[in-house]
Amino acid sequence: MSISNAFIERPIATSLLMVGILLVGAAAYPLLPVAPLPQVDFPTIQVTAQLPGASPETMASSVTQPLERQFGQIPGVTQMTSSSTLGNSAITVQFDLARNIDGAAQDILMSINAAAGQLPKNLPSPPTYRKVNPA
C-alpha cells in the first residue's frame, strides 16, 4: 500500500486536510517577518553651483566637468550623475554603503576647494553641498 492510496481511498479526509493546511498558511502569512522593501540609506551628497545667465553648455563645460573630475578621484564613489540647466548645475554623488556620510562630505568639500582654481572667476559663490536621501 502506497501513500497515495490512502488519500485516494479517503477523498473527504484529503479535502479536509488540504483546507486545514490552507487555513494555517493563510493565518501564518501576515506573521512572516519580511519587509516589502529593505531599509537601505545610501550615502548620497548633492552639489549645486550657480552662475546666473550661463547657458547649460557653459555650465556643463566650465562648472560641472571640473567638479566631476575632482569627485571622480574620491575613493568609494559608486555613482555620479549631473544636470546642467540655465545658470544652475547639480551633481549627485553616491558612495558605497560602507562609507560614512560625514567622511564623504569632508571629501566633497576638499574636492570643491581643489577645483576652485578651475571654476569661472565670475562664479558669485562657491558650490554648495548637502546630504540627501535618494529615496
Image (spheres, helix red, strand yellow):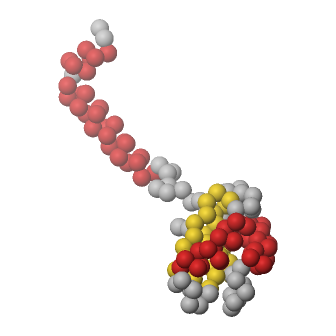
**Residue 117, quarter of picture:** bottom right
**Residue 134, quarter of picture:** bottom right
- 20 left or right, relative to 70: left
**Residue at the image point whose x is 68% and y is 59% from the top:** 77
Relative height, residue 48 to residue 53 (above, below): above
Q: Position of residue 108 (x, y in %)?
A: 74, 71
Q: Position of residue 80 (x, y in %)?
A: 61, 63
**Residue 13, quarter of picture:** top left
Residue 46, visible in the rendered structure: no
Q: Number of callouts in the render?
A: 0
Q: Position of residue 63 (x, y in %)?
A: 65, 77
Relative height, residue 81 to residue 23 (above, below): below
- 34 left or right, relative to 67: left
Relative height, residue 13 to residue 80 (above, below): above
**Residue at the image point whose x is 47% and y is 49% from the top:** 32
Residue at the extreme top:
1
**Residue closest to the eye, 17 or 39:** 39
Q: Position of residue 86 (x, y in %)?
A: 52, 84
Relative height, residue 90 to residue 3 (above, below): below
**Residue closest to the eye, 112 or 34:** 112
**Residue closest to the eye, 134 or 110:** 110
**Residue at the image point whose x is 40% and y is 48% from the top:** 29
**Residue closest to the eye, 65 or 49:** 65
Q: What quarter of the picture does the N terminus occupy?
A: top left
Residue 52, visible in the rendered structure: yes
